[in-house]
Structures are given as structure tokens and as C-alpha cells.
Image (cartoon, rainbow, N blue to C red):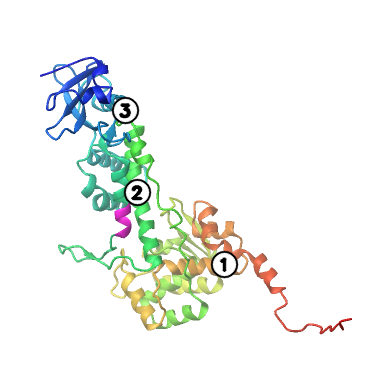
Amino acid sequence: MARTNRANALDNRTARLKLPIQKRFYAGIGGGLALCYRRDGKGIGTWTARIGFHEYKTRLIGEADDFKDADGETVFTYFQAAEKARELEKEYKTDAGLITAPLTVSKAAEDYLNWYKLNRKSYKNTSITINTHILPVFKDRLISELTTLEIKRWHESLAIKPRRTRTKLLSEQAFLLPPQTEDEKRARKSTANRILTVFKAILNKAFYDGKTASDTAWRRVKPFPKVEEARIRFLKPYEVDYLLNVAEPDFKDLIQGALFTGARYGELVKMRVYDFMPDQGLVFIQPGKSGKGRHIPLPPEGLAFFESLTAGKTGADFVFIRRNGRQWTKNDQQRPMKEACRKANIEPAIGFHELRHTYASMLAQRGIDLLTISKLLGHADTRITSKHYAHLCDTTLRDAVAKLPFTNKRENKIVAIR
């Protein structure tokens, strides 16, 4: 086997092309680290890192810039390959200097979920996202071998995939049609961005924990711009009446609860009788998505509604229950909401979350400031509130337009031409 420790035999493209094919040539970098160059039978040169002394490991770095311009990701100059080899060496060596296996995406995801379970909420949803969209593609990939291009292509593929739909247990996963309208395409891109955020969080934790040497590959991947600006849908007063008139009694209670409090579906179905404080005219929303609980003042109609709903129940009973006496659970609201919208001729049909938007929009249109609305909705800050409802709170524009002379009441002044 031909060997050399002289870099000048490898750091020059012309000199490399004079070397015999299918033989390995080494340039020592130091400390048991060496860079190997080899051309295959087709004449394509590759760089490989050799890490360690007697017991060493090898890692393919990428193609040599013999016939292509180097990009530092898939095609490398000698010096780029040497730098990449040093990064790989850091991942293989522990603090004691021992050679270990590098980190896979699967192991990084496991570490991230263990941390997430202790420090964040929505563990189940995050775990589903990882197992559904990330691990099937990147499970056994080494983090150090990820490239910007492959992450970009994966991110873009998420935006054109059809949306998953509810599927019976043990049945093959069902999908809706691929996105057709501009809003459907925007929504898929928005979903792709959220999945990318989770993937980056996994990789960033590995980087900050010192388990991978560089974050360049994924730091260069940017989310789709301007896809979170969905048009907020909310019901008009007559649509609210229609919806309440046609909804089943138990689901009607949930609708009214949402309109009186602005609470999320998940917050409502967890509400217990002791969360209602009739003497203070308040309901307490248990800590949920934002991690903080909040007290919601009730209007007179809302107070009477909760008094009737909790009458005869004990403190630990759920406020909202189904007609069969069972608790409302995740996604139980979807079908009755769709059916109520159909009967009420609300097209396109809204989701339960739009009732929360309706509550907020009613406050905004009555001149309530954004800070107050933000507190009532339980937002962490006013940015998300402003994003959705600022245009409804701003009466300045409406007042300005109201002063425009849209009538034809003008003086007819005719001046003779001289």
C-alpha cells in the first residue's frame, strides 16, 4: 500500500491526478489523525479521515475537487478535507481521549426527548413529530455527515406532501389530497417550518452539548418566509346564533364555554367545577400550552351559564361532559364541529379554535387593548396577539376613512371661461 506523509503530494490537484488509481495515499495531520486520498476505477477521487493509532476508525469525508469546484459540503479541497477530518476527530474522542462511535440522529433525538420530557410541555406531540417526519428519513445518519442540501430537500419535500388524516388503529396511514389552493400550500409550508424547528432543536442540543463539532449544515437551512400569516377566521354574530341553534346539546355547551372564555378546547375539557368561582365571577384556566394558568372574568350571561352547568356537581367533576357521561378527549370535537357547520351552512367549515378567534375579535372590535386581550388569551407576550388582532383594534384607519366625502353633496361652482 502506497503511503505518504507529505501533504504536497495531495494538496495540489495536478499532482494528485498523477498518482496511481485504486491506491491509498495518506497525509498525517497529527495526533493519530490522517487524511487518505484514493481514486476509484472511474478516476473519481475521495477523501477519507483515519482517526486513531493502532485501533483506528475511518470516515468518508467526500469527493476530492479533482474535476469539480469545491463547495465544502460534498466536494472538498485538501485543506477543507483536513478541517473536516479534525471536526470528525472531536466527535469520536471522549474527554478521556478514547475513540468512540459518532452520534447518529436517532441517538440525538433520544437525548433530546429525554431532556424535553423534563423541561418542556407537549412531549407527546413532539415525540410524534420526530417519529413521523424526522427519524424515517435521518434515523441512522451521522450528524457530522448531514449536508445543507439534503436537509433543504427534505424540508422542501414536507411542503408538498399531502396532509395526514385520522386513521383507524392498525390501518394504513391515510392522507388527504396534495395541497391545491394557495392557502393550503401556505399551511403545508408552515407545517414544514414547525417540523424543521424540531429537527434543528435536536441537532442544536447535540452541538451545544459538545457531541458534534459543527452546526453549519443545518444553520444554513432557512424556513419558508411569510407562511405564518394566515387569515384569521372568526364568526359573525348571526353565524354564532346559527351554530348554537343546530349543535347537539353537549357540544353546544362547549361552544358557549369557548365563546364566554376564549379558552382552547383542551383547556375547556380539563376544567373542573372547582375552577369556577361564582362569587368572584371568574373561571380559572389550568396551566396549559403557555405553562401558566389564568383567571377569566365572565360577563353576566357567562356567569349564569356556568352556574347552570355546574349545578348539582361536586368540585372535582368535569364542567363539560359528553351526553353519554364520559369526558371529552382529544379530537372528539372535530366531527360534531364539522356537522354543526354543515347544518348552519357555514362554509368553509371552521375548526373549534376559530371560536377562540371569535372571542378575541369581539373584544378587539369593542376597543379592548391588545395587552388585555393577550392576558385573557394566555399568550406569553403581545406579539402573537398583535399579529392576529391588531388590525381589529386599530380604529384610527376606520375613523380616517369615515371622513372621506363619499356623498355627492358638493357645491356646483361653475366659472365662466373668459
Asked whether disc 2 touches disc 3, contact meaning CB atoms under 8 Å apart, the reply is no
Label 2: few (<14), some or many (≥20) within 10 Å?
many
Front residue of this view, candidates 275 and 231? 231
Q: Earlier in the sequence, mark 2 or mark 3?
A: 3
Label 3 – label 1 distance at C-alpha:
59 Å
Front residue of this view, candidates 410 and 119? 410
Amino acid type shown at disc 3 = Gln
The residue identified by callout 3 is 80
**Residue depth check, mark 1 versus mark 2: number of the one nearer the observer:** 2
**Residue 57 drawn at (x, y percent):** 17, 25
Q: Main secondary structure of the magenta part?
A: helix
Residue that protrudes farthest toward the left in the picture: 1
Asked which secondary structure carries label 2, the reply is helix
Answer whether residue 118 is visible to the viewer in this image. no
The residue identified by callout 2 is 196
Q: Quadrant of residue 404?
A: bottom right
Residue 353 part of the magenta segment: no
Q: Earlier in the sequence, mark 3 or mark 1?
A: 3
